[in-house]
Image (cartoon, rainbow, N blue to C red):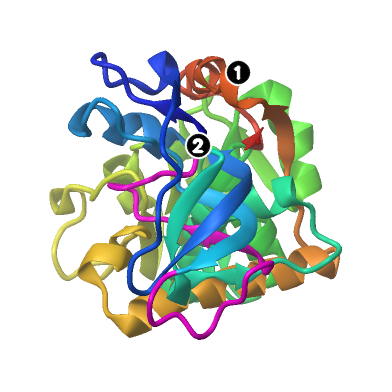
Amino acid sequence: MKALTLTEDRTADTLALTDLDVPEPGPGQVRLKVHACGLNPVDHKVAPGQSPGQVPGIDVAGTVDALGPGVTHATAGDRVVVHLEVAHGGGLAEYCLAPADVLAPIPESVSDADAAALPCAGMTAFQSVDRRLKVTGDDVVLVTAAAGGVGGFAVQLAALRGARVIGTASARNHDQVRELGADEVIDYRNEDVPTRVRELTGGRGVDAVVECVGTATELLPTLAFGGGLAAITGRPDWDAVRQFTTAPSVHEIALGAAHRHGDVRARRELRDMLVELLDLVVAGRLAPRVTRTFSLAEVPRAYAGLMDGHVTGKYVAVI
């Protein structure tokens, strides 16, 4: 089979197109014939810690091709999408292995590319907005990088819950972020975000922050009393807020860690969140936002674009 593998450089933009043996599924695994694989910044972030020859790619849409021993809840020919463990990857290939217990069925009306756009970014946003921050229609929510992958999904999900949404984005993306459901958009390049948040909320602050760009410490003081921050790119410094004042909560989002550090319940949640996201897509309430697709050979160039941090929507490899 054809696959993209890490070279000695161990960077996502220098992947090599390689011939590999088709893998055989072990106990509890299925083999997927890969149709599409979502591309994520995390693939690049973890590459230096991986081994040359490893195949990256964690968001896979495909067809069940073979069953490993003990697999009873999947059938050859099933069309599924899955979020793989970040440390293992394997999705940027014609075939890959996946745990059978985290597979989500793809509805007939959803394309492979749209399904592959959902897992990492969509579930990170869903876990932040729905499971951790528990956003409601009474809340004001701040979403950073609101035109990006995670941010774009977070804006849509918070708006679906009736919240007032404030997004941050460069000026050229303001209209797009408003179309996703944001009520106000802050130009982070030309405005001080914490100051503008206080102005937009009459000094009260926001009830929830979905932080996607590494500014968690800066934004922790923007929370109203009892507010929560979903930390996607790293924990904030607690010293940014004095003890026993606004009583904030911080929720570390480590989606893929459910494979290695979670139990059956944690892995089941990966599948359940994907099912809910797919249902929203089918209902026309959530846009997967695939902005570009790439062939396997074009993926290194796609990662080079992702690494500049200014990509809107989702990039997907179609295999």
First along the sequence among labels 2 and 1: 2
With respect to residue 173, does 226 lie above or below? below
Q: Quadrant of residue 45?
A: top left
The secondary structure type at the circle numbered 1 is: helix
For image coordinates 54% across by 47% down, the residue present is: 150
For image coordinates 40% across by 14% down, the residue present is: 14
- Main secondary structure found in the magenta portion: loop
Q: Position of residue 234 (x, y in %)?
A: 26, 46
Magenta segment: does it hold 86?
A: yes
Instruction: Name the side, left or right, on which 91 lies relative to 8.
Output: right
Indicate the amino acid at tag 1. Glu
For image coordinates 58% across by 68% down, the residue present is: 274
Q: What's the CA distance linking mark 2 and mark 1?
A: 11 Å
Magenta segment: does it hold 112?
A: no
Q: Quadrant of the C terminus?
A: top right
Q: Is residue 59 visible in this depiction of the protein?
A: yes
Q: Position of residue 139 (x, y in %)?
A: 57, 70
Q: Position of residue 278 (x, y in %)?
A: 70, 67
Q: Name the residue that disc number 2 marks.
A: 92
Q: Name the residue that disc number 1 marks.
A: 298
Instruction: Name the side, left or right, on which 8 lies relative to 268.
Output: left
Instruction: Name the side, left or right, on which 242 lies relative to 291.
Output: left
Closer to the camera, 31 or 212? 31
Closer to the camera, 266 or 146? 266
